[in-house]
Image: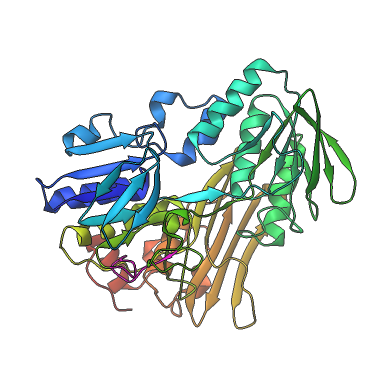
Amino acid sequence: MKYLIIGNSAAAVGAIEAIRSQDRTNPITVISDEPYLAYSRPLISYLLAGQVSQENMFYREKDFYENNRVEARLGEKAISVDPESKSITLETGEKLFFDKLLLATGGTPIFPEVEGRDLEGVFTFTRWDDVQKIMEFMARNRIEKAVVVGGGLIGLKATEALVERGIKVTVVELADRILSITFDHQAAAMVEGYLKERGVNIITDNTVSLIKGDNSKVEKVILKDQREVQCQLLIFAIGVRPNIDLVRGTSIRVNRGIVVNKYLETSVPDIYAAGDVAEAFDLVMGIDRPIPIWPSAYIQGPVAGYNMAGLPREYGGWFAMNSVDICGLPTISVGLTVPPEDGYEILEDHHPQKLTYRKIVLKDELVVGAIFIGKIDRAGIITGLIKDRVKVTSFREHLLREDFGLVWLPKEYRKHMVSGVGVEV
């Protein structure tokens, strides 16, 4: 039995640990186009800000691969998969064969075809190498102003890092507000006001249509409305799409991501997918879709690994969830935060002057989404109610109490939270 894993982040690490819990002998090979040991991607903004050292970026100890008898081929790129011959081809032309394959290739940054994007000083922001290139560029050049294209979580974390370095930042967002996917208008306005007080310029309903420079370096961007914004550094942080390039044109079924079943197996037996590249079940939305977040990959990896090793495990699904500190302002968004239609009930507690906002979205007496800004200490309990699909009928009026806790929950659910046994409430 030969196990092969393409990718080296949360899903891959989880799969390795699950496989080794069942199979201590058969070989595991990991292929990654990045030269680094497994590292925590959410930390790249802190690396750019100088708040985390390179040594503290790693997700597992340096002897993780050796201890788990994994052949880690780092800095090597897989360019194709042949499901019929059960092989992959590397960029060097070398072929590797497998019995079980995990595709954990993650996401690819969205990088629009804007004229001037090849100028020096233009970057994406999803990987360690992106940060290395940005820091090297900053070391060689005097950077006073930067533009970040994208007002989502990735863009705002890049903004935070640049502000920490004393750089004046302009955020350009195509939607009518920042954080439009995860936050409603009230929450977005609160974060926007907070950032503006810290010197961040925010432009919404706009995008970059042209990048101009001199001596091959970026100097300014021209926006859709013809406004010009000066900058010596430009970061595109629009988001990511599932990296399905390896499987295009093969018998492996793809939609937005790689389609998987409840065992995270693809349409081809013995080939699995997990993490940002997989189109898996969303508990809240009730559909299969990519959820490009670290917790989802962390949960999917072991499920795929157990199944690869022959121990059947079902993936019960997960949901969108982000816990992010933005320039010192703690924020959490969980599940469906901006309901698309009627039939939802909204509970809110909004105190702009205190920089606190709490919102809970209900449907059919179930919590399906929540936003917390400033005051986030009860978010874990609310997330548990979403995950376990607990009807809140008997305690709904207490959900936004400042002292809301286990005491307000049904006795059987409290027992479940303590013991982990199944719950029926």
Q: Position of residue 145 (x, y in %)?
A: 76, 28
In this rendering, position of residue 25 left or right of residue 95: left
Figure quadrant of residue 417: bottom left
41, 185: nearer the viewer: 41
Q: Can see residue 301?
A: no
Task: State how many labels appear.
Answer: 0
Q: Nearer the viewer, residue 345 or 245?
A: 245
User: Measured from the top left, where is residue 318 in percent x and y?
Assistant: 40, 64
Residue depicted at 65% across the width and 21% down the height: 138
Above or below 172: residue 272: below
Q: What residue is shown at x 56% (from left), y 71% (from top)? A: 361
Horizontal relation, residue 213 to residue 257: left or right: right
Residue 247 visible from this viewpoint: yes
Q: Residue furthest left?
A: 25
Residue 372 against residue 10 in the figure, above or below: below
In-front residue for pair 5/49? 5
Principal SS element in the magenta part? loop
- Quadrant containing the C terminus in the rendered view: bottom left
Q: Which residues are magenta?
A: 258-268
Where in the figure is residue 241, as x and y percent of width and height?
Answer: 54, 55
